[in-house]
Amino acid sequence: YFRKIFFLTGNSRVKKISEASGLAHKLGCSTVGLGALLPSASKGGSAIADKSVNNITTGHAFTVAIIEEMINKLHDMLDSRDEDISIAILGAAGLTGESLSGYIISRKRFKKVYLIDRPDKRHNLGKIVSRNKSENTIEISTSLKDLKKANLIIILTSSASCIVTEDNLSAGTVLIDDTHPRNTHKSLADREDILVLDVVVTAQGIRNNFPK
């Protein structure tokens, strides 16, 4: 269903999502959560906000909180010092990426932060840096080659042009992949010196189809 509506023209796409929101309201729902790529298809929900009869959430803030918790647990598990960690955010100019980038920079926790996205989003990367001043090193890039500079990578883009392969990584890298299907190449599963973690939250009584 998503594949069908995503490639509709803008107005038709918004209309379809609004119709789904209206159906949810008729079924008694007061809040609609836009999952998967639906936030991107509706400008973060803003395109249907004035047409919807429901409260709208995209879950991006919750995703940022979960990733921050994962980073803290990794930090304790690896017994690493903050100054030894270089973090890269791939998809930094996206809806979730922008929020996470601002949060990571504002914490001034890591000595080096690399904000990476597609070439057409380079201007947006610059705006993120301008809004979030930091004494630490913040670099922006549109090349996957710069992932080699980081030992912790957060993947937040589903763009087909941003598939992370072995050639993009250094030995000992830890990746937190928030994409589904994964934007990490399947060959990484064979690398014992690279760890890939999925961003998944489970709740009692709710079934998900993510592999365990």
Image (cartoon, rainbow, N blue to C red):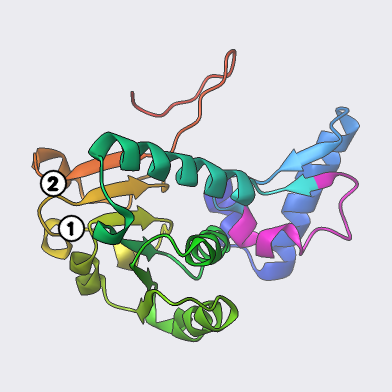
- In the rendered image, which quarter is residue 71 located in? top left
Residue tagged by mark 2?
Answer: 187
Q: Is residue 180 above or below residue 129?
A: above
Specify whether residue 21 is painted magenta: no
Please determine whether, in this image, residue 189 is positioned above or below residue 157.
Answer: above
Residue sitting at x 36%, y 47%: 177
Magenta-drawn segment: 39-55
Q: Which mark is residue 165?
A: 1
Direction from residue 131 to residue 32 in the image, left or right: right
x, y (%) of residue 69?
47, 40
Q: Residues within 10 Å of mark 2 (few under 14, many from 20)?
A: few
Q: Is residue 50 in the magenta section?
A: yes
The residue located at (37%, 62%) in the rendering is 110
Snapshot quadrant of residue 90: bottom left
- Residue 43: give x, y in percent of width and height: 67, 65
Q: Are marks 1 and 2 in contact (CB under 8 Å)?
A: yes
Type of the residue with mark 2: Ser
- Circle 1 crowding by C-alpha within 10 Å: few under 14, some 14–19, many from 20: some
**Residue shown at the point (42%, 60%) measured from the top left:** 109
Task: State the CA–CA distance, disc 1 to disc 2.
Answer: 7 Å
